[in-house]
Structure formats: C-alpha cells, structure tokens
Image (cartoon, coloured by chain):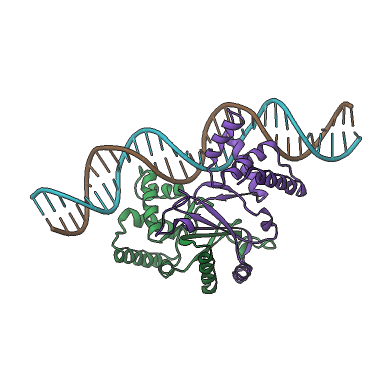
Chain colours: A green, B purple, C cyan, D brown
Amino acid sequence: MPSSDIDTQLHQAKEHCLRTGHRLTAARARVLRILLEASQPLSAYDLLAQYQARHAKGAQPMTIYRALHFLQQQSLVHHLSSRRQYVSCGQPHAHARNALTQLLLCENCGQTQEVPLPTLLSEALQQSFHRHAFTLQQSELEFHGLCAHCQPSKECAHA
Amino acid sequence: MPSSDIDTQLHQAKEHCLRTGHRLTAARARVLRILLEASQPLSAYDLLAQYQARHAKGAQPMTIYRALHFLQQQSLVHHLSSRRQYVSCGQPHAHARNALTQLLLCENCGQTQEVPLPTLLSEALQQSFHRHAFTLQQSELEFHGLCAHCQPSKECAHA
DNA sequence: TGATTGGTGTTATATTTTAACAAAAAAGAA
DNA sequence: TTCTTTTTTGTTAAAATATAACACCAATCA
C-alpha cells in the first residue's frame, strides 16, 4: 500500500475513534501503521519486533496486545484466530453497517483477502440465527484455501 | 449425552476411521469420549486433566494434542480457535458431503451449537469464492452471541 | 486545582502449542 | 512365521501466545 494511502487510512481511523469517543493514541497508531504497511497478517510478536525496531527497543508484549485489543474493538483490525495473526481491516466502515465480512486466507502465500458478505447471504444468515433463537454479537468467518494467484496449476505470485 | 449414545458415536467414529484407512486407537478414543461426554467445549488442558484423572496420571500435553490433530483431520472434532477450545463434532457425516458448518457460540453460558449451513447459503458462498478465484479447502465459521437460553431478557439455563 | 478516568510502562507469569528423538506397536511383504 | 516398514506413543524440553497486577503518567472535567 502506498504511504499516502496509509496516512489517509490512519487519519480516517483517528476520526472514527473520535466519533465513538475514543482516542487513537501514538502507540495505537504505530501498531495500526505497522499492520497497514505489512498488508498481510502478522503475529503479535512479529508486530512487537517491528515496534521495537522502529519505536522503542524495550517495548513489551503488553504494549502490542493492548493496542490490538483496542483496534479490534474499533473494528480497525481483525484477529485471524485460526492463525493467531492480526490484519488491518480493509473497509472499517462496512462493519458499522453491520455487514458480515468473510476472510479468505491463502494457505500457500499467506495473503488475506477481506470480502464483504453479499447482502443476500447476510440476510439468510440472520434468518438462520433467528430460527435458532441466537442473538449474534460478532462473527468470525475464516475460509482457508488457495487464492487467485496460488491455484493448484500455477505458481504463487506472492510467495 | 446418554452413555449409550456415546458408545454408538464412538463405534461410528471407529468405522469412519477404518473406511478412510486410519485407526481410532485407544488414546484417540479416550480423548474423543471425554469430549463427547463433556458436551461442551474444552481446552486442551481441560482434556489433559480429565485424561490424567481417568487414564494415565502422568500423561503429557502431546498425547492430547496428537489425538486432537487426528480427530480434527477425521472431522470428528472441531477446533474453536477463537476460544482455544475443542468440541466434538455433532454430525461428522455432514462434513463428508461437503456441507459447511456454522458454530454458534454462546458468550454467556459457553455452550456450542453446530448448525449445518443451509444449502442455498452454501451454494451462494461457493459462487462467491468462484468470483474471487478462491479454492476453498476448509472453513471456520464461528458466530459469537447469545444462545436461545441466554437471551438478554432471560436468565441463562446453562450457566 | 483537585479528582477521576483512561492509558502506558514494567515485571512477572500463565496458557497454549510444537519440536525432536527414542521406544513400542501394528501392518505388510518375503 | 520373521523381517521390514510404517504408524503410533512416551518423554523431555522449549517455543509461541496471551494475560495479571501494580505503579505511574496524562488527559479530561468539575
């Protein structure tokens, strides 16, 4: 992602936080920036290493985990729990509109793609929940497979 | 779950493994049985504690993890990665037919419900993958919320 | 200005998961 | 059967992931 886009995203993130009565502090913005620049999922300890290299040599895991918790609450970051990695959220605003998001995870090159669930599907799911008297709070839809660049026949462009 | 049903399930699991050229050994069957009897998700160390109490006092984590890996491969057990827990699979055979499974996780009482994804939804998802040139290998659909017994208005029957 | 809330730094520790290698058990071939 | 190969288990150790607790600092607000 070009650096200018990242600045834009960070700015929007800041505004978004203010609107909900929270603050995107320096530490939080740093963690988010690392994720935005990575453009692929990172583990908490990957993040820690970069954070140490770029900002504070003696930084501790808690610093990263605290920032991640916050960013997740704000829907600025996703937790890929099946991989124990974190990734910046592509369209943070989609979440505000209660759209469910699918994450397509490539097992070959590690890339993640965030795809909004088609409205039709979202609604069908809602109905399914209703039938089971289930009140949805948060969804986590992770699909593991091979991305467009890593199809069985081809070589992987991202590896 | 009544003990007789569990025996039935274990027996079916054994047959299922044989059909795919694998063996449901004693250790594996023990771990599966503990999960079936629990009828709710357990962490690997919950399992270890029970395994130690019931079978081998000195058992080590590897014993559990190995059994769990095997049982997951056989679609006899699900990993709830967002909770770091494991749960026995309700309808192992549904997976054989490539039906996607949603897991409804209650944040209040911890209960898990396994619901096959309606065919219509499954097909729509497949199309969505096709549009994104994504080859699905495995899906992990975890929905966090409140189950039928733990609706905001009511008390939770399972707590 | 004082009080309250929210955020950070720091240390330590808990929890979850895997690696590696030797020994045993089961399956298959001669 | 006996030998060989593969699969499974036992065991020790350590890596990777995540949280608890407490003191301190900073921002907000009355």
On the image, the x and y values in percent for residue A156 come to 62, 60
**Toward the viewer: B117 or C15?**
B117
Q: Residue at x 53, y 72 (%)?
A: A118
Left-right relation of B152 to B19: left
Q: Quadrant of residue C20?
A: top right
Q: Quadrant of residue B113?
A: bottom right
**Toward the viewer: B156 or B100?**
B156
Q: How many labels sit on residues?
A: 0
On the image, the x and y values in percent for residue B38 come to 56, 43
On the image, the x and y values in percent for residue B40 come to 54, 47
On the image, the x and y values in percent for residue A116 come to 50, 69
Q: Residue at x 29, y 59 (%)?
A: A23
**Toward the viewer: B35 or A145?**
B35
Compared to A119, does A41 lie above or below? above
Q: Is residue A159 visible?
A: no
Q: Is residue B71 visible?
A: yes
